[in-house]
Amino acid sequence: MEQPGMALFPHHAWLGYWEHVRGGTKRITVCRRQLAFYVSYMDTGWARVRWVRRGRETCYEVGPGAVRISPADGEQHTLIAAHDPGNSFYTLVIPRAQIEALAASAGIACPVEWRHVLCPDDPVLRACMKRLSAPAPAGEADADGRRDEAARRLMLRIVEVNGGRPCWSADAGPFGGRVLEHLVAYVDAHLQSGPRLVDMAPLVGLSPSHFARKFRRSTGLSLQRFVAIRRIQASFARLRDDDVPLARLAVELGFASQSHFTRQFGELTGVTPAKYRKQFTSGS
């Protein structure tokens, strides 16, 4: 059963692999009936490529940071690449059904025909591929959650660079339950920094203003008010079970100051954080 906070479309079953090619190497690759999306990220080096599809030839160069998206179109492709001075690149194989299902859940209309796209310097694609190609750093908190988030952002960006657009007429309602769980988990993981509309809207492929409307329909609250409530909720367990000073707790939860924490806590609960904590410490 899917638990709150897990990605709607986890990437764990994707095939991902590194290739390291020596300088001066010329390779010919023939892809037959490509049934999944191939997304390649150039980490180091350069390559000059000739690409033949439907009898038409395209020539281009790729360098560090470039991402090439080759969609599932069921056709044959021939790539002839000369590598100089040698390079390393990482390729992900993503099921087409996952991308299209994610787009539908976010209210985005997929393009009628998927295009082959070369993005020489796209910061979103590059950041996602770097995250997914690297092993999780030892001791990093929520490493799986961050990789799931990168996988989700990658798929939505693939739709976007292919011309996918929000389907406004079909997107008047609130977020679905699993999507909302994903958004709440993101908020909880970023309480200290304070998630903003510009941070969260790309997670579901929407503009900040469109995201704000859907979020209010889904929760009855603005994002700012929702974050404040989740911060107070997160403070309950800390106040009951932890003797951390209130000033430090306020900073860790993202409040501007201890007085800001105390004021918002009192507005929502009717008591101060100190009085709430005293309920669980008196007589101990």
Image (cartoon, rainbow, N blue to C red):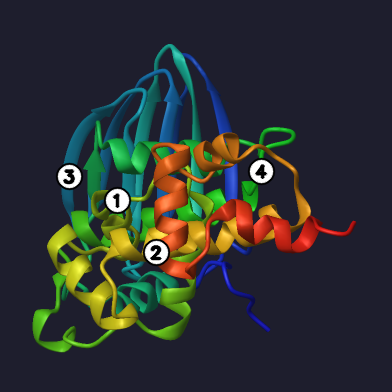
Q: CA distance from mark 2 to mark 4?
A: 32 Å
Q: Residues within 10 Å of mark 3 (few under 14, many from 20)?
A: few
Residue named by callout 2: 267
Residue named by callout 1: 196
Q: Earlier in the sequence, mark 3 or mark 2?
A: 3
Q: Residue furthest left?
A: 169
- Tell me if 131 is positioned left or right of 34 in this view: right
Q: CA distance from mark 2 to mark 1?
A: 22 Å
User: Are the residues flagged by discs 3 and 2 in contact, CB closer than 8 Å?
Assistant: no
Q: Nearer the viewer, mark 1 or mark 3?
A: 1
Q: Is residue 70 above or below residue 131?
A: below
Residue named by callout 3: 57
Q: Earlier in the sequence, mark 2 or mark 4?
A: 4
Q: Residues within 10 Å of mark 2 (few under 14, many from 20)?
A: few
Q: CA distance from mark 4 to mark 1?
A: 21 Å
Q: Residues within 10 Å of mark 1 (few under 14, many from 20)?
A: some
Residue 109, horizontal then vertical, whole percent: 19, 76
User: Are the residues flagged by discs 4 and 1 in contact, CB closer than 8 Å?
Assistant: no
- Picture residue at 38% right of the left edge, 47% below the top: 194
Residue 49, horizontal then vertical, whole percent: 29, 32
- Picture residue at 19% right of the left edge, 34% below the top: 59
Rendered image: mark on residue 141: 4
Q: CA distance from mark 4 to mark 3?
A: 47 Å
User: Are the residues flagged by discs 4 and 3 in contact, CB closer than 8 Å?
Assistant: no
Say which amino acid is labelled 1: Arg
Determine if residue 24 is in view: no
Q: CA distance from mark 3 to mark 2?
A: 66 Å
Q: Nearer the viewer, mark 3 or mark 2?
A: 2
